[in-house]
Amino acid sequence: MLYDVIVIGAGVTGCAAAMELTRFDLRVAVLEKEEDVCCGTSKANSAIVHAGFDARPGTNKARFNVLGSKRMPALCRELDVPYRNCGALVLCFDEADRPRLEELLRRGEANGVDVRIVEKDELRALEPNVSDAAVAALYAPTSAIVCPFELTAAMAENAAANGAEFFFDTPVRSIAPFDAGWRVLTDKGPFEAKVVVNAAGLYSGELHNMVSENKLTVTPRKGEYVLLDKKAGGLVSRTIFQVPGPMGKGVLVTPTVHGNLLAGPTAVDVPDPQATNTTQAGIDDLLARARQSVPTLPVFRTITGFAGLRAHVKQEGGTDFILGPVEDAPGFLDAVGIESPGLSAAPAIGEYLAAEAAKYLSAGKNESYRPGREPVYRPNEMPWDQRVEFIKAHPAYGQIICRCEQVSEGEIVAAIHRKPGARSLDGVKRRTRAGMGRCQAGFCSPRVLEILSRELGVPQEELTKSGGASRPIVGFTREGGAEE
């Protein structure tokens, strides 16, 4: 089947590109090797919309970070995605490091970002719980936080509603040119398109190397995090960074849009693009560094730890996003090395890649493009009177399945039937937060499995936690313990 554009990868960058491509009169397919959107880097990151003061002026990181950050508030309103402009502080603990803070100030100003240095007294007034050892900080009031899961899913829903076709469990095995463009061979057969957008995250280097003589190496960079209970969510009101080092922005402490507190990440290069295990050494390291910023961090309120991988490309003169047309592969567009601030930059990267594809194909506008997505109903966020009336009209939204996050059956059913919709426990969790609370799905998983089975018409033993062989139910027993 011939498409105009194939997007490989359904993370935040790929879904942003797909959404923007549907603004043009193009036939778009999205190929994803996992079972759902948001299964790679996009599901395990700091959820920060960076202001844009860290990236070197003139780089792709600086350009697209600032553009994406400016576009994010309106996009989140349009897609009904949680977003909060909380601001950020970069702490300096030693006067000897003040020149590094001033360099960040100069970068921010060169990038057009609202930044200033605050001294110790103002810093304490802004954030009373930061360390007394901090002598100054860079303050970026435009920094924000977002829900990366809902953002990715919402952009995918918008793309699908406007005609993009999503194919999951569809890993790419080879890419080769043919007369009309590119032939992409997958486990589900060949796909053909005039243009390919390479948004494959950790695997983007491999895809690039299939079509270009100018080889790239993507190194997985692992970052470990801890998530604290909502009782700790008010400890700081802004994202708290430390002066960055050679491996990145360092460990941060930040509120989340859902009221938790997040600390991390570490930064360790690893050989395995699936090495998302946490380690005791990693967690100990990040907590020690997080407490340098916020000494009263209540570690006993930790509800989970997790790790994510970023696609790091080593380059001379510092790292940068590798974006746009590949010189020796006409019609092939790269989005390689999309590490931090990739989430912040995604809306702008998607817009740029779509414009490049449309220009290459001389495509016109899609006059029937529809902004936004289907309404999302969250009774727990409604005023009480409105909630009561809504539940009277929609009783399933009054049946609470996840008590920790107050997620209802109606919300879970809606998440399953959205397009693309949830097909696994993690797919439901990322769209609704069922299982993200204090008990970490200890109570609600059996009921979510029942709902998935009923709505999808799939036996519970065939359902998964996160695709592949991750089946929560591995067998049945008869009375007396005999296996079926």
Image: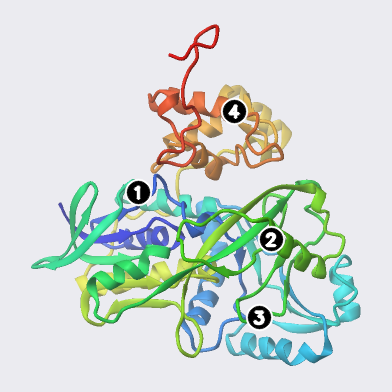
Q: Secondary structure at mark 3?
A: loop
Q: Nearer the viewer, mark 3 or mark 4?
A: 3
Quadrant of the image containing the C terminus: top left
Nearest to N terminus: mark 4 or mark 1: 1
Q: Which residue is mark 3?
A: 245
User: Of callouts 1 and 2, which one flags the residue occurring earlier in the amino acid sequence?
Assistant: 1
Q: Is residue 94 above or below residue 364?
A: below
| Left or right of 165 on screen, residue 225 | right
- How far apart are labels 3 and 4 at the CA level? 47 Å
Q: Which residue lies under the disc numbered 2?
A: 281
Other-residue count near label 2 (Cα within 10 Å), few / some / many at <14 / 14–19 / ≥20: few
Mark 1 or mark 3, which is nearer the start of the sequence? 1
Reading the chain from its start, which is encountered first: label 3 or label 2? 3
Q: Amino acid at mark 3?
A: Gly
Q: CA distance from mark 3 to mark 2?
A: 19 Å
At mark 1, the secondary structure is helix
Q: Are marks 2 and 4 in contact (CB under 8 Å)?
A: no
Q: Earlier in the sequence, mark 3 or mark 4?
A: 3
Task: Sort mark 3 into few (<14), some (14-19) or many (20+) by Cα contacts within 10 Å.
Answer: few
Q: Give how far apart the Cα atoms at labels 1 and 2 are.
A: 42 Å
Percent x, y for residue 160? 35, 49
> In which quarter of the view is residue 290 placed?
bottom right
Q: Circle 4 sits in a helix, a strand or a loop, which is it?
A: helix
Determine the image quadrant of residue 352: bottom left
Name the mark nearer the viewer: 3 or 1: 3
CA–CA distance in space, label 2 to label 4: 43 Å
Which residue is tagged 1?
160
Residue pictured at 40% horizontal, 41% vertical: 468
Kind of residue sitting beneath label 2:
Ala
Question: Total number of numbered labels?
Answer: 4
**Residue pointed to by mark 4:** 397
Q: Amino acid at mark 4?
A: Tyr
